[in-house]
Image (tube, rainbow, N blue to C red):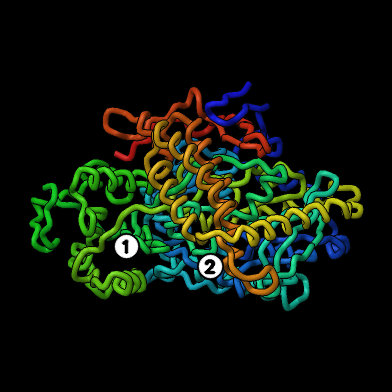
Amino acid sequence: MSDQTHHYKVGEPIRDTKAPEGPIEDRWDKRRFSAKLVNPANKRKINVIVVGTGLAGGSAAATLGELGYQVKSFCYQDTPRRAHSIAAQGGINAAKNYRGDGDSVYRLFYDTVKGGDFRARESNVYRLAQVSVNIIDQAVAQGVPFAREYGGLLDTRSFGGAQVSRTFYARGQTGQQLLLGAYSALERQIAAGTVEMHTRHEMLDLVISDGRARGVIVRDMVTGEIETHLADAVVLATGGYGNVFFLSTNAKGCNTTAIWRAHQRGAMFANPCYTQIHPTCIPVSGDYQSKLTLMSESLRNDGRVWVPLAKGDARKPADIPEDERDYYLERIYPAFGNLVPRDIASRAAKNVCDEGRGVGPGGLGVYLDFADAIARLGRDAVEKKYGNLFEMYERITGENPYETPMRIYPAVHYTMGGLWVDYDLQSTIPGLFVVGEANFSDHGANRLGASALMQGLADGYFVLPTTVGDYLANVKSFGDVDPAEVEQAREAVQQKIDKLLSVNGTRTADSYHRELGKIMWDYCGMERTEESLRKALERIPELREEFWNNVKVPGDPEGLNQALERAGRVADFFDLAELMCIDALHRTESCGGHFRAESQDADGEALRDDENFAYVAAWEWGPDGPTLHKEALEYEYVKMTQRSYK
């Protein structure tokens, strides 16, 4: 079957064959017991490559090294601790129920499946909730300075999509503190000689031999040298691809190159169109901005979101009396109020701004107001919880949030799509494992806040070490890597570099990236329609062709060349953007962060179509266009219902 108008073919269904049967609470124990083990003496003879040093990659490399494997770790930054996980602010979820407010592993599982709009796998999400409890213990043992309440227990706060307080935090710098914990574990293994660290190296291709992932081709970003590194298994922990939109909350270096090149080698890409829009971002301030800054979702614990009742009300916020304000989240969603999930809060903000009630330049902003919290708790208490976030906001905007409300607006943040993996976190290429934001596995169509840190550390510390061991123990003999396969991968990398440098056109890669990002935001952003997606699918190939005929990449392949790095990443973003739009176009339902204007109920809420779309869309790359493989989603424990936070 093929559909030329949609640019794709439909192939055989795909199944996750690794998830055990039986009661959901026993499945991970069952899988761990059935997994084959590698004895300690043999581990020393086995090599594993881990690409990326964020929470998933750092914890994975540290744990595999601790187990005795010979690990090679790669990152493009000058130190592993500069991974973008360091920017996470608000907290990490775990079902410890210290508050005694009704939390449990099952409730965390339920909230995460519901928060993902019933588009995640039950088995994976339940395991995540189970393992969350161990993550906190591990982090505390590493010295992560979580906030504590007066009795000495770790403190928690609330996050969107939950009615319990389960988010552990270290002021507004939780990601930084957790990453430093994983980094210290990683550095310990580097010192012990079990992990060999390669900084300033970018992965540009995957080596496959005898049908298995056996290594990577990387470029030394300082010398320009193309290197081959071989191993018995490869782990990708390279983060998300939100920078396809150009303006996002991601660090400028975040890209899709590692997972996209693996996709071209045969790893299926799942749900590429599932992008998370974060509701509390500092609004865009001008045409030449290159990055957006996030204000933590934790601020919605104490900050109240509002806009003026009247359209075009340009008065200062202090001059607008209470009865002329619309606290719209509290009004529309009384049960959850300001703590609705991110996709709901983002769309509500867009709606009030579309009505002409937005604030700030261009009317693209809403207020996040702390006046009530300061009056109730006192300024000192608010400063203890959020001081560094308030300081960051003031530095960027020149406004003091203790005295005037913050202005926020939704922005691209996390990507729930990524390489398809089974319950063991293995991709469709044997021996290629994918962890953290680089895989698609746990969040469905919308990630609840404070779940990314939980998933990254669960994958790296607790899941991957078991499942990689099982893979390695089951392979009788790896044999030598075929030199012809290595040469072919090296040649592909070299050709791409040569091609980029030879065009010598008139426009920078960044200018093309900015234009691509605008197409993606306008046509495949917070709201998509069939018409807008078809426009994007016309425009993206045209712009890509222009890029390959007119991009200017100065400098040489030898040595440091940041223009070359950026151009390679933008080239991959073009290909990914096209697949994202094809995926978005084929899914004619609204779910989670994917809002199709044609699919909404009478109240303007997202309307899912479970009869036709209760599946994971896993895309196979092909020179003539992608092939769609569907993985059916079945729910035994959480009944599929239209989400309500009212």
The picture places residue 310, in percent across and down from the top left corner, at 11, 47
With 342 as the anchor, is 65 left or right in this view? right
Question: Compared to 473, does 281 lie above or below?
Answer: below
In the image shown, does 608 or 75 lie closer to the viewer?
A: 75
Q: Quadrant of the N terminus?
A: top right
The picture places residue 117, in percent across and down from the top left corner, at 45, 38
With 345 as the anchor, is 56 left or right in this view? right
Res 590 quadrant in image: top left
**Residue at 48%, 73% in the rendered image:** 145
The picture places residue 437, in percent across and down from the top left corner, at 56, 53
Outermost top residue = 1
Please tell me how crowded label 1 is: few (under 14), some (14-19), or many (20+) other residues with Cα within 10 Å: few
**Residue at 8%, 51% in the rendered image:** 323
Res 498 quadrant in image: bottom right
Label 1, secondary structure: give it.
loop
Which labelled disc corresponds to residue 286?
Answer: 1
Please tell me how crowded label 2 is: few (under 14), some (14-19), or many (20+) other residues with Cα within 10 Å: many
Label 2, secondary structure: give it.
helix
Give the residue pinned by disc 2. Answer: 178
Outermost bottom residue = 191
In the image shown, does 434 or 352 lie closer to the viewer?
A: 352
Three-letter residue code for mark 2: Leu
State the separation of the CA atoms marked 1 and 2: 33 Å
- Mark 1 or 2, closer to the camera: 1
Question: Compared to 611, does 368 lie above or below?
Answer: below
